[in-house]
Image (tube, rainbow, N blue to C red):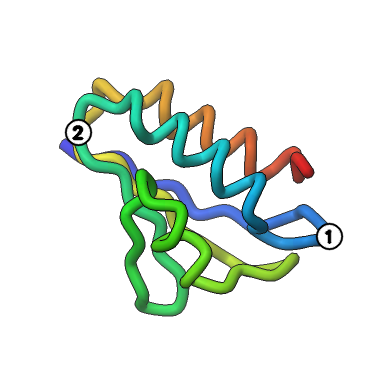
Amino acid sequence: MELIRTMTVENEFGLHARAAAQIVKAAEKARGAVFIEKDGQCADASSILDILTLNCPMGSTITVRVDTTEDKDILESIERLIKLGES
């Protein structure tokens, strides 16, 4: 069963390269696939290029999805990265 969370990008620089790299590190630890979606576009969260292609400035609403409940900790880790606005 997949888990899905919708959140807002709070970093003033949006979802920039450094933040995307931290998300990739978290996603690479997942047992299943991790995806980020924005405006109907879906990105593999283990690919920095996919994430940056979404173009997520501050205030963007994104959805993070993990394919298995075993990756709940990964989902929460990514949510913290996005909500805390790490730069």
For the point 22% across and 25% down, the residue is 31
| Residue on which the image places disc 2 | 32
Please say if 68 is above or below 6.
above
* Foreground pick, 76 / 34: 34
The residue furthest left is 1
Question: Residue 35: percent from the left, percent from the top?
Answer: 33, 52
Q: Which mark is residue 2?
A: none
Lower sequence index among marks 2 and 1: 1
Please say if 11 is above or below 76.
below
Question: Residue 18: percent from the left, percent from the top?
Answer: 66, 46
Which corner quadrant holds the N terminus? top left
For the point 47% across and 71% down, the residue is 53
Which corner quadrant holds the C terminus? top right
Question: Residue 51: percent from the left, percent from the top?
Answer: 46, 59
**Circle 2: is it few (<14), some (14-19), or many (20+) Cα within 10 Å?**
some
Q: Is residue 18 left or right of residue 31?
A: right
| Residue on which the image places disc 1 | 12
Q: Secondary structure at mark 2?
A: loop
Quarter location, residue 26: top left
Quarter location, residue 83: top right
For the point 51% across and 40% down, the residue is 23
Which three-letter amino acid code belongs to the residue tagged 1?
A: Glu
Q: Is residue 62 left or right of residue 50?
A: right
Q: CA distance from mark 2 to mark 1?
A: 30 Å
